[in-house]
Amino acid sequence: MLYKASPGQVSYGESIGILLLDTYTPFVPGDVGNATTYSFPVRFQRIDGFTFSKLLTKDPALVEPLLEAGHNLVKEGVKAITGDCGYMAMFQKEIASELKVPVFLSSLLQLPFMEAMLGPEEKIGIICSHSDYFDHEILEGMGVQINSSKLRVMGMETAEHFRLAAHVENGLLDPDVVEQEAVSIAREFVSEYPDIKLILLECSSLPPYGAAIQQATGLPVFDYVTMINHVHSAVVKSRFSGFM
């Protein structure tokens, strides 16, 4: 087999490109920003100066650094591009229309798929980083059409250790403590809203605690990693072997 080099590309074999905010938070295994989360190679691209607080301003000028970083990932050969913050969703349309590979910036893109699984009275429970920042403008920015009555939302802002690590960015994180906080919030959530039948973890730092949340609630749990694995399975197909 003869391989051909791509101009400007100096490494190969990374299927998923991940746009990273400029943060000071430990990314533990299971976090979108930790390479050991994946069973396949990924490529990270930090956007210098693009902080979480800056993202929350919703400044349209932020599209430009996102696009620049996305183009860099495409030049390095990735087959699809995601991000490490669900609130990047507000720029989903602009980035997807510009880049020449599939773009899926937010775990919230799974909502229509999840909604199709529900019965008439069943709901999706979204656990997000900070509930005050979740609004339907984000969903509109992605082009997601979903019945808002199907959604319940609860945030992690009352979880003190998580808040200090993810919002204050004090540089420290104890995953055992965050797991306890996340499970406590999930239990409160489904107790308050027993009509929740599926859970979506919006924040890219929450997948490490998905298994514990599922064990505590007995519900299917979707997150960034379920989405990334799904897209990877579509852009890098595997051949099957077995017997009959």
Image: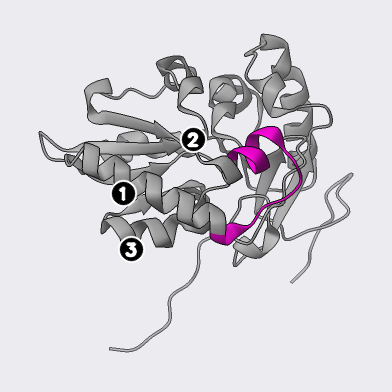
Residue denoted by label 1:
187
Relative side of 233 to 144, left or right: right
Badge 2 amino acid? Thr
User: What crowding class fits label 1: few (fewer than 14 Cα within 10 Å), some (14-19), or many (20 or more)?
Assistant: some
How many marks the image carries: the answer is 3
Q: Bounds of the magenta span?
A: 163-176
Classify 9 as above or below 22. below
The type of residue carrying mark 1 is Arg
Res 200 → quadrant = top left
Residue 174 falls within the magenta-colored stretch: yes
Which residue is rendered at x = 79% and y = 27% of the image? 68
Q: CA distance from mark 1 to mark 2?
A: 14 Å
- Residue 156 in magenta stretch: no
Q: Nearer the viewer, mark 2 or mark 3?
A: 2
Judging depth in this view, the residue of 193 and 231 nearest the camera is 193
Separation of marks 3 and 1 at Cα, in angstroms:
10 Å
Label 1: element kind: helix
Contact (Cβ within 8 Å) of mark 2 with mark 3: no
Label 3 amino acid?
Answer: Gln
Residue 215 is marked as 3
Outermost residue toward the top? 60
